[in-house]
């Protein structure tokens, strides 16, 4: 496999994250914001997005793995690392790299809602088009992309390419 073409450039990502950060900063003014990044994919989005946030913010991470092949999700989610902090009464913003089937987030949101946060919202850099998924409200969406397998900016194929500063499409050699 190799990188076929650039789908979203570094500059486009950077200005989108600035917009998203500005919206989040407005909405969470005076609130106790906790951003939860979903490992491993969201680590770069979390780092870059959070540097556009001007209100006080705390961070936590969850690591999940979904059973299935390298490029497909089964919907069965395993929590590999839970939160360090209690979220009851806090304003929680989940940060994800990509929403594909939506099954991972659907599961996580149900799991976190039980802990009674004051609010629970979602930011995702990428959302795949034309996919049937459970209802998910993405309050801070980045880009809609075609239903192709992408890598870069945190996203991997077999643990590679996460460090690419742009989003690229993977192709057979
Ligand atoms: P879901 O299908 O929405 O549950 O996606 C679960 C996870 O699959 C995401 O958080 C990503 O880690 C991974 N994933 C889904 N689509 C892609 C892709 O196009 N490239 C790389 N990883 C992906
Ligand atoms: Mg992954």
Image (spheres, helix red, strand yellow):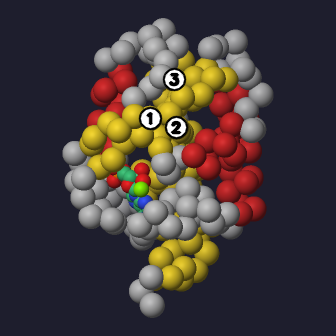
* Residue at 36% from the left image edge and 15% from the top image edge: 115
Mark 1, residues whose alpha carbon is within 10 Å: few (<14), some, or many (≥20)?
some
Mark 3, residues whose alpha carbon is within 10 Å: few (<14), some, or many (≥20)?
many
Q: Position of residue 4 (x, y in %)?
A: 54, 83
The quarter of the rendered structure image containing the N terminus is: bottom left
Question: Toward which corner of the image does residue 88 lie, by quadrant?
Answer: top left
Query: Helix, strand or loop at disc 1?
Result: strand
Name the residue beneath numbered marker 1: 62
Left or right: where 27 falls relative to 51:
left
Q: Are marks 2 and 1 in contact (CB under 8 Å)?
A: yes
Query: Helix, strand or loop at disc 3?
Result: strand
The residue nearer to you, when weighing 8 against 62, is: 62
* Residue at 35% from the left image edge and 38% from the top image edge: 80
Whether 2 is drawn above or below 34: the answer is: below
Determine which of the numbered discs, if any, sits on residue 125 in the image: none
Q: Are marks 2 and 3 in contact (CB under 8 Å)?
A: no
Q: Earlier in the sequence, mark 3 or mark 1?
A: 1
Left or right: where 124 falls relative to 158:
right
Q: Position of residue 35 (x, y in %)?
A: 57, 29
* Residue at 44% from the left image edge and 67% from the top image edge: 157
The quarter of the rendered structure image containing the C terminus is: bottom left
| Visible residue check, residue 132 | no
| Visible residue check, residue 172 | yes
Determine which of the numbered discs, if any, sits on residue 92 in the image: 3
Query: Helix, strand or loop at disc 2?
Result: strand
Name the residue beneath numbered marker 2: 37
Mark toward the viewer: 3 or 1:
1
Looking at this rendering, what residue extends furthest in the top direction?
89
């Amino acid at each position: 496999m190799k990188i076929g073409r650039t789908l979203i450039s570094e500059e486009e990502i950077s200005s989108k994250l600035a917009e998203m950060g500005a919206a989040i900063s407005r909405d969470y003014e005076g609130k106790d914001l906790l951003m939860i990044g979903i490992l491993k994919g969201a680590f770069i989005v979390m780092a870059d997005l959070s540097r556009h946030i001007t209100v006080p913010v705390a961070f936590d991470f969850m690591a999940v793995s979904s059973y299935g092949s390298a490029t497909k999700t089964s919907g069965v989610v395993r929590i590999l690392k839970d939160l360090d902090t209690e979220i009851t009464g806090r304003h929680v913003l989940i940060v994800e790299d990509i929403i594909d089937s939506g099954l991972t987030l659907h599961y996580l949101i149900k799991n976190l809602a039980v802990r009674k946060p004051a609010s629970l919202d979602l930011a995702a850099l990428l959302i795949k088009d034309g996919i049937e998924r459970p209802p998910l409200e993405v309050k801070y969406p980045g880009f809609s992309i075609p239903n192709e397998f992408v890598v870069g900016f945190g996203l991997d194929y077999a643990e590679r390419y996460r460090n690419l500063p742009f989003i690229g499409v993977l192709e057979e050699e």
